[in-house]
């Protein structure tokens, strides 16, 4: 949970620095979505970062949509997170997509379906 909160926080920081003010944040954690929307209370451990994230969301300068998606619809983010484990820096900004995610981006662009097995 802590890693996901930090990722959302860092995403908001990057968007602010890049002057992006219209965001759609999709998360595959229903708990995280609930905490950001205020539907689920958060623990003291996460209070500082979540409070900052809520300020970003509630700011008049921003349009932020928070929604849940299943992991099958979040494969690019999952791949980037897996790649991040091996990176030296705590934050990397790519000027173009890494080669490792190009097939996933193409699948997204053509509307490939990823059936959910239940």
Image: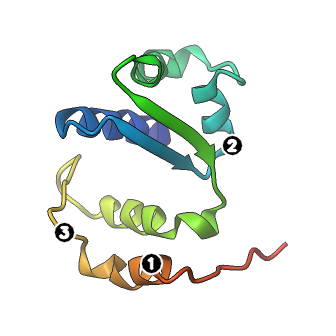
Mark 2 vs mark 3: which is more N-terminal?
A: 2
Q: Residue at x 28, y 64 (%)?
A: 86
- Per the image, the residue denoted by label 2 is 30
36 horizontally vs 93: left or right: right
Instruction: Say which residue label 3 marks.
Output: 96
Q: Residue at x 54, y 49 (%)?
A: 26
Question: Badge 1 local density, few (<14 within 10 Å), some, or many (20+)?
Answer: few
84 vs 54, nearest the viewer: 54
Q: Do residues under tags 1 and 2 come within 8 Å of each other at their CB atoms?
A: no
Q: Is residue 48 left or right of residue 65?
A: left
Q: Earlier in the sequence, mark 3 or mark 1?
A: 3
Give 64 or 116, whichever is nearer the viewer.
64
**Residue drawn where x is 48% and y is 22% of the image:** 50
The Cα–Cα distance between marks 3 and 1, rounded to whole angstroms, is 16 Å
Front residue of this view, candidates 4 and 109: 109
Question: Does the image show residue 73?
Answer: yes
CA separation, marks 1 and 2? 25 Å
Residue 1 in sight here = no
> Which part of the image, by quadrant, shows the N terminus?
top right
- Give the vertical position of 34 relative to 56 (above or below): below
Colour scheme of this structure image?
rainbow
Q: Residues within 10 Å of mark 2 (few under 14, many from 20)?
A: some
- Mark 3: secondary structure: loop
Q: Position of residue 19 (x, y in %)?
A: 20, 36
Q: Is residue 61 above or below residue 70?
A: above
Residue at the extreme right:
118
Q: Which residue is mark 1?
A: 109
């Amino acid at each position: 949970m802590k890693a996901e909160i930090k990722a959302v926080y860092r995403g908001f920081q990057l968007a602010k620095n890049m002057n992006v003010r219209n965001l759609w944040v999709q998360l595959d954690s229903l708990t995280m979505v609930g905490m950001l929307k205020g539907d689920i209370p958060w623990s003291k451990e996460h209070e500082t970062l979540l409070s900052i994230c809520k300020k970003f969301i509630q700011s008049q300068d921003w349009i932020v949509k928070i929604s849940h998606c299943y992991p099958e619809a979040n494969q690019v983010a999952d791949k980037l997170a897996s790649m991040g484990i091996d990176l030296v820096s705590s934050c990397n900004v790519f000027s173009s997509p890494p080669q490792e995610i190009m097939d996933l981006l193409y699948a997204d662009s053509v509307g490939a379906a990823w059936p959910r097995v239940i």
